[in-house]
Amino acid sequence: MQVLVSCDFLIAPASCTDAEIGILVESLIAIKRDLENESSSVLIEDDAINKLSAQNLFPSAQAFNSNLASMGNTDYSGRDIARTVNNILSMHLNKEIAPPYCVADWTNRSLNPNVTGRNMVRTSELNEMFEEVSLAMKIHQRSISFLHHPVAPGAANIEFNGTVESLEPIGTQTIPFDVSVNIPLYQSYKDYLLGLDAYKLYEAAVSDYELKLAIFVGALTALRDRGHHTDLDVWQTFTLGPRFIESLKSHQCYGTQNFASTCFDVLRHVVARLEKYENSPFCTGADRGKQIVRNGQLAWRTHVTKGMQALRLMSWTTSDGSIELANVGNKNALEIF
């Protein structure tokens, strides 16, 4: 599922509480990171820079600082927020970032709940965007959610209904036709991530970044399901070793291989610090009471599978508690990379 980020979300501090500003900032950092890593899951509202400029809403440090000061907020710098937003807006986004272009004449069009923008012009632009998104979902079978601020309390989705009387470009649809879609509605990037199927992300991952994202989303859902606080800062608490993917592949723990789902469940719980099995010190063969140390990092191991395969996950921890997922190995030939 892709998420479409509205212009209003990018400039949200003018109407945010202190808590919402924190959510906004961590969301913007995560969105920027995903776009920098060429994620196809994040969509930015089409022509966002010009739309903001036309309404004198262009994200500047001065504007953000003014809004933050009026709320007495000193935790975040307007310059830092503006830089992050402008970095997002200045990226050379390819055509896949925007929803497929469709223009239609509608009758019986309805939107529930009504989504408002920063002014009447923005509200009108949002309505047009929902028409395009609905057509993309109906005609192109796209799965698109929406990230926006402000959102009506308790609103979890947008119900869009209407009848298309004419369409450009003309497709295979018989005119007229009805459109009825539910667009998931989020007010933080974390909420969007928690709505994803983490294991499907793991199955589809082909790069270190995609694999880390899958494990990260899995860790967030594990924390949520256990009633713990979920925080996007979890991303900063773990890394993948240089031979990690290689070890997954060679031990049937990658993609859709035999032990992939079992390994993924262990990985996400280790990252969430909710280990499924005891995480034991990994000791040297010569002195089994001495834990292996590398440049101040401590070596650990935990079960992935039991029985004949007896796979283990090896990892390193640093003095600040961060984790490097090193490799998966066989019990009888254990080594840590």
Image: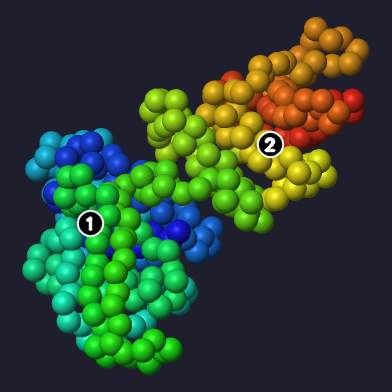
Q: How many marks overall?
A: 2
- Please name the residue shown 26% across and 74% down the image: 131
* Image coordinates for residue 336, horizontal then vertical, percent: 79, 30
Residue beneath disc 1: 11
Q: Do the residues labelled 2 and 1 touch (CB within 8 Å)?
A: no
- Please name the residue shown 31% across and 60% down the image: 183
Question: Which amino acid type is shown beneath numbered disc 1?
Answer: Ile
Note whether 245 is above or below 299 in the view shown: below
Question: Which amino acid type is shown beneath numbered disc 2?
Answer: Cys
- Please name the residue shown 24% across and 67% down the image: 160
Note whether 5 is above or below 105 in the view shown: above
Note whether 255 is above or below 293 in the view shown: below
Mark 2 falls on what kind of element?
A: helix
324, 177: nearer the viewer:
177
Viewer-side label of 2, 1? 2
* Image coordinates for residue 300, horizontal then vertical, percent: 71, 22
Whether residue 334 appears in this view of the structure is no
The local crowd at label 1, few if under 14, some if 14 to 19, many if 20 or more residues have their Cα within 10 Å, is many
Task: Determine which of the numbered discs, if any, sits on residue 263 in the image.
Answer: 2
